[in-house]
Image (tube, rainbow, N blue to C red):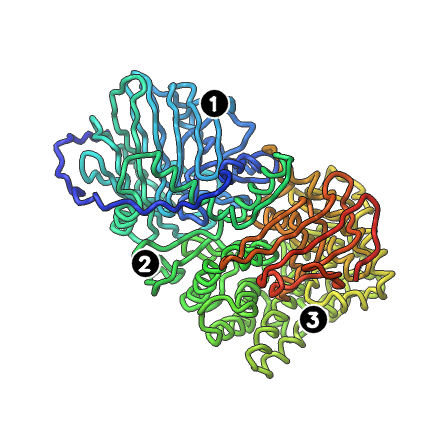
Amino acid sequence: MKKFPISLILFMAGLTVAGCSRLSEETEESYAKLVNPFIGTDFTGNTYPGAQVPFGMVQLSPDNGLPGWDRIAGYFYPDSTIAGFSHTHLSGTGAGDLYDISFMPVTLPCREAEAPLGIHSKFSHENEQAWAGYYQVKLDDYGINVELTATPRCGVQRYTFPEAQSAVFLNLAKAMNWDATQDSHIEIIDSVTVAGYRFSDGWARNQKVYFCTRFSRPFAGVELDTAAIEKDGKRIGTATVARFDYPTREGEQLTLVTALSGVSMEGALGNLRAEGSGNDFDDYLADAEAAWNSALAKVRVKTDVRDEKAVFYSALYHSMLAPTIYSDVDGKYYGPDGKVHQTDGWVNYSTFSLWDTYRAAHPLFTLTQPERVNDMVKSLLAFYDQNGRLPVWNFYGCETDMMIGYHAVPVIADAYLKGIGDFDPEKALEACVATANLDSYRDIGVYKEKGYIPYDLHDPSEGDNWSLSKTLEYAFDDYCIAEMASKMGQKDIAEAFYARSKNYRNVYNPATSFMQPRDKEGNFIEDFNAEDYTPHICESNGWQYFWSVQHDVEGLMALTGGKERFVQKLDSMFTFHPTDADKLPIFSTGMIGQYAHGNEPGHHVAYLYNAAGQPWKAQKYLSQIMRTLYTNTPDGLCGNEDCGQMSAWYVFSSMGFYPVNPVSGKYEIGCPLFPEVSLQLGGGKSFVVRAHGAGGANCYIQSIKLDGKPYTKSYITHQQIMEGGVLEVEMGSSPGKAWW
């Protein structure tokens, strides 16, 4: 253990730049305090309860200290230990990575267990609370109260100590789940400031997180402990742990401000100067709450049921935890080519869970966060420049290649078709086409050749091939390219990709009336059972993926045999229960018959009743899903949050409409949950949904008016919403006729 004296030069004496101005907006109530961040921390939600601002780089949250699926976001509500407060987390992805830059306050001697738990404390939920931008817990073993808040690029901690010999550990060696420390460094800058980095490997390969931390008062002593990290018998780096000593009086407080950077320690210092110059925790908290109040006030819900408000605003909150800011205040960021790049007046974003979020989260941003949508598109295009293709699932400057499709395409196309942003459409179309024509990547070449992906191209020992799902996902993305090209007047490109968008027909087997894997000779797979979960279908079965033709519902209906047969199949989807529910895979949760709300492929399915002229059935199931599968409890999410998609579905559906085809500019009308919802559009405009009689058994629409006139369509358009107006819906307890 190496010890350092405190006779250090004040290297950062200039760190007195005024903090960022308060992001405040007067609201009638604190939307931030309506949020319950504990929703999803139990069961399968895999969320974290800690502090973050909208889309912030920092996700400062407690870690229970143990690995496992239940703790994939670092925290699991049934647990009773905390082993640190780290600055990076993933919201409900099912991927166990990050947990970077972990601090733990203690009194000495501290409580330590065998690895992986290590230094830790017991805690109780009775002494824990959280809302948007704030988290608090008492560490029972030490009598220390911990409070967390954040800025876009900084995490802020306040510890309240007992009288004791106290200390703060900074553990850069600790790793959990998929994450593994490759190298780390801690540098003592002055009597209150440290900097360093943690490099790791996991889901995000070659991840680099730099930091700079300022303590609110000088530490009495510092101890550094280092150990070699070895791989294949060779040293690859250093695992570093620091202990900062503080003799404390009863009630004495210590505030830590930690800035992150993906670029350098100098970048972290710049972020600290810009966003974290002060030591007043309450000031940071007020700014964080103001940022959340401003973002959450974009949708104003009227209801007398507080739990319903909590569920709604918690969902809206969860929808804005990702994508995350991934550039420093000076615009520098780390790219997938391993180089540092510079933005030109825009903010770079990362953490794009596109297989999930293209469905509802990104369309929601076009209504609530159009300025960020522009920067997100520019981020995707920059990734294309540096990686040679658009991302599939990227974060921390790394392409994980998780999941399937090229779903950056619908995000880009949707923004362009809605007229959002100032990105270069020609460049955007180029990126989309190039990605869709990358023959060597994930069977795209054979998909183009045959019009489907044969299931027998892969050795079964190599695991899932997801051939059927790839075919359907590619066909949708191709449609998005065609729509974009058509609007741009690129006729040849449009025609080519419209043709490719019909490839879903090539995997439809009329003999079974299901989408079915085919071999390279064109034969449908034998002994096909739509209930089975197979390597050919991504996290779903034949029932659940059958409906993945959001871009051509009329065509799918025709294949099925017309409206009547289509409705019969939909009815069966919701009433044909699994034969052995105990053997369902982990991603098949929130089950209603074969419908699995806990995973994304089926999120649009209930709305398909509209296309068949029986909307009352959609309303019935939508009401059931919203009222039973979303609750104001830690287990209140029925599946992985998946970076906001699960919650974005609820936000849309509870407002009363949903983007079945995310790039169509249309939202199918479903079942408004609240008496009134007002979507604030800027410029003094708002779009209001008034659902007269909504609540309880009144889930059925009787009639609709738009701006006082009878409305005769099953959907509303993006343009209609953006123009502002009032959608009046009469609700009742028994099915009404189709109003169109």
Query: In the image, residue 233 lies at what x, y percent?
Result: 36, 44
Count of numbered labels shown in the rendering: 3
Query: In the image, residue 440 lies at what x, y percent?
Result: 54, 70
- Few, some or many C-alpha atoms within 10 Å of disc 2 (few <14, some 14-19, many ≥20)? many
Residue at 85% from the left image edge and 66% from the top image edge: 561
The kind of residue tagged 2 is Lys
One can see residue 725 in this view: yes
Q: Sequence order check: which comes first, mark 2 or mark 3?
A: 2
Q: Is residue 539 above or below residue 133?
A: below
Q: Which residue is mark 2?
A: 332
- Few, some or many C-alpha atoms within 10 Å of disc 1 (few <14, some 14-19, many ≥20)? few
Q: Which residue is mark 1?
A: 127
Q: Is residue 477 above or below residue 322?
A: below
Q: Secondary structure at mark 2?
A: strand
Q: Nearer the viewer, mark 3 or mark 1?
A: 1
Residue at 64% from the left image edge and 80% from the top image edge: 495
Q: Give me the C-alpha separation between circle 3 and circle 1.
A: 56 Å
The kind of residue tagged 1 is Asn
Q: Which residue is mark 3?
A: 503
Closer-to-camera residue (660/559):
660
